[in-house]
Amino acid sequence: MAKRKGAKNNFAKREAQNPEPSRRRVGQALEDNEQGVRLKVVRVFAYLVLLFTVTQVLGFYTGLFITKDAQQNEVIGSLQVVSQPEQPVSVLYIFFYVLLGALVMFLLVRYYKGDLLFILIEFAVVSFSSSIVFYALLKPFLLQTELSMAAAMRWGLPSGSSSPRSLG
């Protein structure tokens, strides 16, 4: 123990005589910290790019599957928004439909001051969209459309532990 105290005192004496090495160590520590922060930022960015890519691939697959299934399956085909999807006018219909939805959301955000409506909208959006993705993933394995739809709707609903009230 005495050696340590002596070594500590010697270190303190050397630092007092020449403070330059201490400054270099502090500067090196700051550079190491900056590199660590940069590495963390790069990792987070890479993770976000990976999530974005997986989401895009999953959405692309779902869109292709639903479009193909709508041509062969009467139940899914009856859920089409436009009656003649090959007509160019149907693009305008969908465009104005999306604009109307955006306008409604803008007005809600601007003038509605409560939380319940936004919680319900979030619940509906997440449930509906995840049910569509789960249907596209399950349908190749479950040949019955109704069974695939029921399982997809159940898996699309959030469980009780992830409800907005338990998170807040």
Image: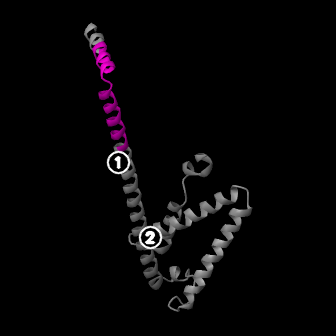
Q: Earlier in the sequence, mark 2 or mark 1?
A: 1
Q: Give the structural element (helix, strand or loop) at label 1.
A: helix
Residue 52 visible somewhere in the drawing: yes
For the N terminus, give its image quadrant: top left
Badge 2 element: helix
Measuring 60% from the left and 46% from the top, which residue is drawn there?
166
Residue 150 in sight here: no
Residue furthest front in the image: 17
- Asked if the stretch drawn in magenta spans residue 33, the answer is yes
Q: Nearer the viewer, residue 22 or 137?
A: 22
Please name the residue shown 56% across and 88% down the image. Answer: 90
| Disc 1 residue crowd, few under 14, some 14–19, many 20+, Cα 10 Å | few
Say which quarter of the image contains residue 33.
Answer: top left
Q: Nearer the viewer, residue 108 or 42?
A: 42
Identity of the residue drawn at 35% across and 43% down: 36
Q: Residue most toward the bottom?
A: 87
> Label 2: which residue?
59
Closer to the eye: label 2 or 1: 1
> What residue is at 31 percent from the left and 32 percent from the top?
24
Q: Is residue 147 left or right of residue 12?
A: right
Disc 2 marks a residue whose amino acid type is: Gly
Residue 100 place in picture, x, y as percent = 65, 76
Distance from the alpha carbon under mark 2 to that under mark 1: 30 Å
Residue denoted by label 1: 39
Q: Which residues are magenta?
A: 8-34
In the figure, 92 relative to 128: above or below? Answer: below
In this view, 106 is above or below 94: above
Which labelled disc corresponds to residue 28?
none
Find the residue positioned furthest to the top. 2
Within the magenta stretch, is there residue 132? Answer: no
Disc 2 residue crowd, few under 14, some 14–19, many 20+, Cα 10 Å: some
